[in-house]
Image (tube, rainbow, N blue to C red):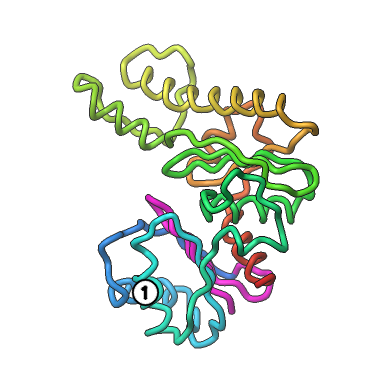
Amino acid sequence: MLLVIDVGNTNSVIGVYEGDVLKEDWRIRTVRDTTADEFNVLANALFSAKKVDTSQITKVVISSVVPASVPILNAFCEKYLQLSPVWIHPDSVKKLMPILYNNPAEVGPDRIVNSVAAYAKYKCAMIIIDFGTATTFDVISQKGEYLGGAIVPGIMISSEALFHKASRLPRVEIFQAPKRIIGKDTIESIKSGIIHGNASMVDGMVSRMKKEMDSLPKILATGGLAPLIADLSETIEKVEQSLTLDGLRIISASI
């Protein structure tokens, strides 16, 4: 079995593959000040609940945008799985995708992994939107080249900044869109601005990016809030929630 882990700034995603089949997956909170032993307690609870036999894990592949996670997960893998994990970086995908960034080393591992997975599945020009701590746009050419993209403050970060800085505005749940764009009270107005506003931002960015591309891209979305925004967006064509895990599996097979 293959164990894949994607460590994000807010959440981490863990998956177990048998061949090309994702058998189990989990989304957990990213904790920067944990230890290898504490992570093992959490991982063991998740694995045991789904009857995953860790002795069958033969390889571990990890992507991370949190440097503090490296020593923790290295120690966990070596102590409890007797394996040295493979860490994803731009050189990991040399055989799979040219990275046409001015400095390829600057591209986040999560963006690389998403791009590889999307192109492997669809084999066409694409814009991939990942709704995480930051909302990222990654652009792939018809030939499978990573062209670059854009980074926008994420929905949750933007919301927290609004609630923190505007003392008279209440904190609201943003996991369901209001039915109207024109809010009739403060809570409805905040929800409209955050949710419909982000959907409009996505459509605007996609429209502008298309003008700089020489082919018509397919528009994919991933990340925790992707389904919510995709329902309101006029440009997102499909949500692929396992994109990052699939990318780690694909890259694993090439290295």
Residue 253 position within the rendered picture, expressed as x and y whole percent measured from the top left: 68, 72
Q: Is residue 59 magenta?
A: no
Residue lying at 37% horizontally and 64% vertically, measured from the top left: 69
* Vertical comparison of 3 with 227: above or below: below
Residue nearer the viewer, 193 or 95:
95
Between 108 and 190, the residue placed more toward the observer is: 108
| Extreme residue in the left direction | 167
When the figure is inspected, residue 133 is found, relative to residue 231, above or below; the finding is below
Residue extending furthest front? 102
Residue at 37% x, 20% y is: 188
Specify the quadrant that holds the N terminus: bottom right
Q: Which amino acid lies under the numbered mark 1 shown in the image of this protein?
A: Ala
Q: Which quadrant is the C terminus positioned in?
A: bottom right
Q: Residue at x 56, y 49 (%)?
A: 111
**Residue tagged 1:** 45
Relative horizontal placement of residue 120, taking residue 242 as reference (left or right):
right
Q: Position of residue 23 (x, y in %)?
A: 59, 70
Residue 57 placement: quadrant? bottom right
Horizontal arrangement in the rendering, residue 181 relative to residue 104 (left or right): left
Q: Residue at x 79, y 43 (%)?
A: 142
**Could you tell me residue 249's position as x and y percent?**
63, 67
Q: Which residues are magenta?
A: 1-22
On the picture, is 35 further left or further right than 246? Answer: left
SS of the residue under disc 1:
helix
Location of residue 170 (image quadrant): top left
Magenta segment, prevailing SS (helix, strand or loop): strand
Please say if 236 is above or below 121.
above
